[in-house]
Image (tube, grey):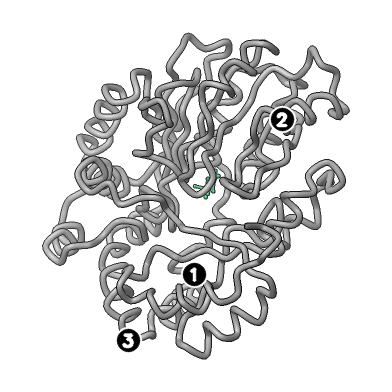
Amino acid sequence: MAATYRLRDVFRQLFTVGRQKDCDELCAYLKERYEGEAILCKNGRSALAIALKSYFDTGDAIIVNGFTCYAVYEAIQAAGLTPVFADITKEDLNFDVDTLEAAIKKAQAPREKIRGIIIQNSLGNPVSIVAIEQFAKKYNLSIIEDLAHCAGVKYPDGRECGTVGVAAAFSFGKDKVIDTISGGAVVLRTPVKHRIKAPSVAPRPSDHLRARFYPWFGWSCRKLTALHLGGIRMKILVALHFVEKSADNRLDLRRKISKFEARLALRQFKNLRKSGELPIREFCLVKDRDAVLKKLAKAGYYFDGLWYKQPISPERYYQKIDFPEQDCPTAVLVAEHVINFPNYYRRSDLMPAINIVREHLWEEAK
Ligand SMILES: *Cc1c(COP(=O)(O)O)cnc(C)c1O
């Protein structure tokens, strides 16, 4: 849960009435802030798929960060596109112009089929946008910005993430910057090639219920993490399927967002501007991750769901993907050594954990 939950807001969400107005207001907000036509979706991967379908043809290829969430891969597949994975750097977990050039050279897809690039700004670390834009121009690529990790973040040149590409896709999934447990949005910033139908099927009653109670669970989880019980509580919730694991959130282009999610997302967008509490997850590379995780667990910290333990995460999906490990050696290495701090801990509560991690930093990566 990225957002801090105030008790007053928790109760407001519990007893509120969901209205179409909530969706309309979120759309209006996104339209103004990101300068385009906003469509609300069931989740981030559906939003990304709509963005891709709007600007590309089936059979096109698209460059994507070689260190990402399965949700991104799923969206690319759903849009009928071929992914071209670019390796990352250890410094910011993003591709740079060198790894992009290498990816284009080695890509199996014909050069003229590669027509786009997805910028991810991993864990809230922005790419060197000016250089990436030049690269995109050189190869005539349309830029799609994936804001799951980086809503509210600014690029080094001062522009806001989401105001550069032809489209911006948002995830409001669990642990993302805007976190209403599920939901997403896409902002189409330039005229589309294909007009995709906006979602029109009503959310399931259980979606509404989850979104209504989510802030309450978030609030109590935070209280419990202070007692080192939050991880346990979350595990119970996941087991009860109250909280869908975000990697298992189904892609669905027809299903609408819950009005409760829209309402909560809008409030978080507005808070984002004020708080500037970033990045989403701080990361470092440790030598023997299993040993560090054991030590952390002993100290009462459960860092499950690390971003990411495989170049395309989580593992159960990675096995199904034909990932070009030989072309993305840094992504493979980073996935073995990376550790990052879940944002449901307060920074002051995290200090002992940070000290443990600091003792085990991976020398080669410095
Ligand atoms: C989580 C995530 C998404 C979308 O996730 P949903 O679970 O479908 O909301 C998209 N891109 C990245 C990089 C993500 O981490």
Mark 1 = which residue?
241
Residue at image location 48% in from the left, 43% down from the top: 125
Q: Nearer the viewer, residue 326 or 245?
A: 326
Locate the C terminus by quadrant: bottom right
| Residue highlighted by disc 3 | 227
Q: Is residue 290 left or right of residue 268?
A: right
Decide: is 317 above or below 142. Answer: below
Could you tell me how far apart the alpha carbons at marks 2 and 3 are, in whole angstroms?
46 Å
- Residue 351, image quadrant: bottom left
Q: Nearer the viewer, mark 1 or mark 3?
A: 3
Any mark on residue 98, and which?
2
Q: Are marks 2 and 3 in contact (CB under 8 Å)?
A: no
Residue 150 screen position, x and y as percent: 43, 42
**Residue 338: x %, y % from top left:** 62, 62
Q: Earlier in the sequence, mark 1 or mark 2?
A: 2
Query: What kind of residue is marked 2?
Result: Asp
* Position above or below: 310 against 325: below
